[in-house]
Amino acid sequence: MKKSLSLLSLMVALAAGAAGATGTTAGTTISNTAQISFADDAGVAQPTVNSNTVTTTVLPNPSFTITPNQTTAGTTPTQAADYANPGQSLTSIKPGDTVSFQYTLTNTGNVNGESYALTTPSVGGTGTGLTTANVKYYPASADTSGDGVLSAAEVAASTPITTISGVAQDTSVKFYQVYVVPTTATNGQTYGSSPTGTRQANGTAGTTNEPAAPFTQPTDSNNANLVTISRTDAGVIGPKGYAAGNAPAGTTDTTTTTGITIAELNDTSTAPATSTTTKVTFTNTITNTGNRTDTFDITAASLNLPAGATVRILDASGAVLTDTDSDGTVDTGTIAAGASKDIRIEVTFPAGSTTTDNTKQPTVTVTAKSSNDATKTDTTTDTVLLPGVAYGDKTATGPDATQTPTQTAPTPAGNNPGGSTSVTLTSVPMQIKNTGGAPEAFTPAGTVTFSTPTGSVTVPVTYLPDANCDGTADSTTAITATPSVAPGATYCLIPVVSIPNNAYPGAYPVTQSVTGNTTGVTANDTNDTITIPKVGTPTNYVVKAVDLASAKPGDTVTYSITGQDTGNANIKAAIVSDTLPTNTSFVSISATTAIAAPAKILYRVGGTGAWSATAPTALAAATKVEVAVDSNNDNTIDNNDILKPGQSFVVTFKVKIN
C-alpha cells in the first residue's frame, strides 16, 4: 500500500527548488588578448596590434546536494543523520509495510558525467529490527505509476541501485530510498534512515574532471527520514461467510473436506570492426561426422570483450538457439549423419569500442559437444578485430602522448605579415602504433596558432615520412596518409610548420591527431610546442600575462598588460584595450606608470565618450575597457600624448571565473 509524504516533507522538498547555475564547466579555456592602438611619431594612425593570447583553464570544482535535508537548524551536508528532525516523515505505517522516500541528487559542481555512490551508514528511530542492510535504493524509473511513491509491487519489479552515474552539471536526478518496516514493530515506534551520497572519482587526479591531490570527495549525509508505526490488532470470527457473527437463520455450510496435496577444436573466424560498428555476427557450421543421427550442445566462452558487450547464440534464421533435448544446454537439434547445420554467434558491443593491445582482441570460443558421446567435442574461435591507435612523441617503447618536447624556431624576421619560415620539427618526431587487430592506414593532421601584431594566425602542420623511425625524414615531400600499418607495428612522422615571420615570441602548442582511414579510430597529442625566442627588440608594443594558468569558479584571475614603446621613435595616443572575457565577471581594473607628473592614467569604457581619471567599478559582459597615459595632463587622449622609447604603463585587470 502506498503512503503519502507529510506536509512538512512536501514543504522541505519544495524549498529545495531547482538546480542553480554551477559555474563554468571544468576544462573550459578562457582566452584573453589585449590590444594597443597608436600613431607613429608623425601622427599617422597605425594598425591595431594584438597582444599575445593568454589562457586560463577552468579547474574541476565538484559538489552536489541530496534533498530534502533534515530540518536541523544550521544543517550542513556532512552532518550526521538527525532522526529527531527528519526532512521527510510518514505516519500511519503498519508493520511489514514497504516505505519509500523520494530524494533529488543535483550536480552543483562544474564537472559533467559525475557518479555518486549511495550508502546507508545508519538507521534510526525508537524501534528495533531495521538494519542498514535492509535499506535499498531505486531509480526514478521504478515509479511506473508516476505518483512519487514506490509500492511494494513496483519495488519487486525493479532492481536496486548503489550508484547514480552520468550526471551532467546543473542536472538533477531523482531516486528512492526504500525499506520494509519490521513485522515486530509496535504501535508508536519510529524507524528512519538517511541516504548518504559520496562523489566518485571522475578520472585521474589532476586531469580535466578530477581535482589534483590532495582532495577529499564531497559527501551529503544530512537527509534523515522517519516513519511512525500505527498498529491496530483485532479480529472477528463467525459462520462461513459471516465473520461478524450476523448469519441469518437457516444458513448452512456446504463446504466438503477433501485431501490436499502440496506439490514440491581449433578453428578461427575473424571480423574487423570500425569505430561505428556495434554488432558482428559469425556463422559457424556444425557437421555430424559420425555414422548416426546426433544432437550437438553448443556453448560459447568469451575473452577480452569490451565493457557492455554481449554474446548470443542463434540458429541460422537468427532466432535464439533453444535446448531441444532438455539437458540444460542449447543445441543444434538433430543432425543426420553426414549432414550440417549453421548457427550464428552474435557479438554486440558499444560503438567506439577500441583496444590498446592488438594481441588481446575480443574472442568467442564456440564448442560443439555430441549428445551421443559427451567425450566428442570440437571448438572454433570467432574473433572481433577492434580498431585501435596510439599516437604521440617517438620513444623506444612506442608513442607517448604525455611527453612535452619543444622545437626552438628561428627568430621572427619582423613585421612582415606575408612572409613565413618553414621549420622541420626534428625535436618533435611523432610515432603511430596500430593497436587494432587489422592493418590500416592513418591520416595525420595538426595545427599551430601563432600570435602576431595583426592577430592570431593558424597554420597547418604537414608531415614527412620516417618509415624506419630513425628520426630522419625519408623524403622532403609531405604525405597525407601513411601506408598500411600492420597490427602492432609503428610508423613515424616528422612534422613541418610554416611559422609567420611576424609571430610573437613564446611557446605555441602543436595540436596533432591521427585518424584511421578504414575504421575512423582517432588519437591525439596536444602538448608539444614550438618556441619562438625573444631576441633583440621585438615589435610587441603590448604584452600580456596571466597569474593563473588554471582556476576554479569563483577564483580571481589577474591579467597584467604592458603597453610599451620598444622602438627608437616616439609613439602617440597609445591606448591599451581589453574586453571582459566570456565566462568571467568584472572585479577591478587599475594602471600604473613610471612616467613623471603631470602624466596620469585615464580610463574609458565602451570605446567612446569622455576619459576619466577614475577607474570603472563595473563592466558588462563582452564590454571593452581602455587605458592610456595622459602625458600632457589635459584629461583626454590624442596625438599630444607621447610615449617615448623605453616608456611603458602597466594595466592590472582582475576578473572572477563564473
Image (tube, helix red, strand yellow):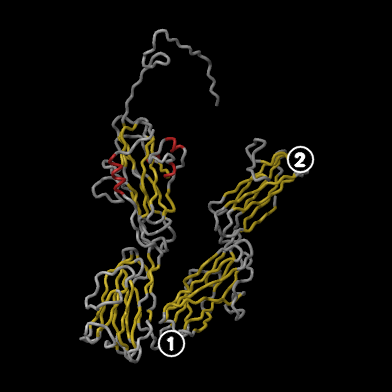
Q: Which residue is mark 1?
A: 414
Along the viewing direction, whichever of 537 and 460 lies nearer the viewer: 460
Residue 506 makes an appearance in the image: no
Quarter occupied by the N terminus: top left
| Discs 2/1, front | 1
Residue 557, compared with residue 49, is above or below; it is above
Secondary structure beneath label 1: loop
- The percent coordinates of residue 184 (x first, y second) are 35, 30
Secondary structure beneath label 2: loop
Along the viewing direction, whichever of 276 and 577 lies nearer the viewer: 577
Image check: 291 left or right of 576? right
- The percent coordinates of residue 633 (x first, y second) are 21, 85
Q: Which residue is mark 2?
A: 336
- The percent coordinates of residue 483 (x first, y second) are 63, 71
Furthest residue in direction top, as rendered: 250
Q: Residues within 10 Å of mark 2 (few under 14, many from 20)?
A: some
Q: Residues within 10 Å of mark 1 (few under 14, many from 20)?
A: some
